[in-house]
Amino acid sequence: MMLTDEERRALVTYRMQRARETWAETKIIIEDKLWYAAANRMYYSCFYMTSALLISYGLAASTHAGVIRMLGMHFVMTGIVSKELNSFYVHLFEMRQRGDYDDYIQIGSADVLPFVELAEKYMTTLETIINEKMQP
């Protein structure tokens, strides 16, 4: 992805905003106890923040699995992002995949609620890394 610094900053800002807005949606959906939708939106809030992280470093991936690989290769293996947060993100991806595409899968409060705090930690951690990288 060949972007000017200005374009890259704008795209990172946009993705971070999408992440925050999607996280706000997630909280409302959780309050309404819509567990499949909550799993989906929780994943996407983290996906948008992860995409912003990759873009801030000039990296890009064309698939969700590619985003996971890039996160692992450039941020987990280098110690910038913890293995715990990476495992959480992979788990969210798998839960979202099952909820969206598999038949007879049950997603309930026990599948979503234990990960709310980790989702907030994930988003905050990545946002901090992005902000440090994007400082002039």
Image (spheres, rainbow, N blue to C red):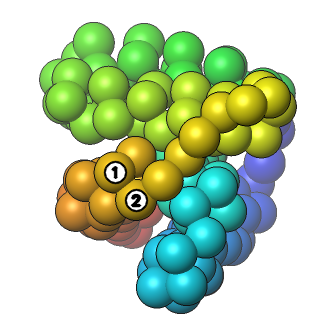
Rendered image: mark on residue 109: 2
Callout 2 amino acid: Ser
Residue closest to the eye, 34 or 118: 34
* Quadrant position of residue 97: top right
Residue drawn where x is 67% and y is 19% of the image: 66
Query: What is the C-alpha distance between the residues marked 1 and 2?
Result: 4 Å
Q: Residues within 10 Å of mark 1 (few under 14, many from 20)?
A: few
* Quadrant position of residue 125: bottom left
Rendered image: mark on residue 61: none
What x and y, as percent, mark residue 56? 53, 49
Name the residue tied to disc 1.
110
Residue drawn where x is 59% and y is 40% of the image: 106
Q: Is 118 left, or right, of 35 in this rendering?
A: left
What x and y, as percent, mark residue 110? 34, 51
Kind of element beneath mark 1? helix
The answer to whether 131 is drawn above or below residue 1 in the figure is below
Residue drawn where x is 46% and y is 27% of the image: 90
Kind of element beneath mark 2? helix
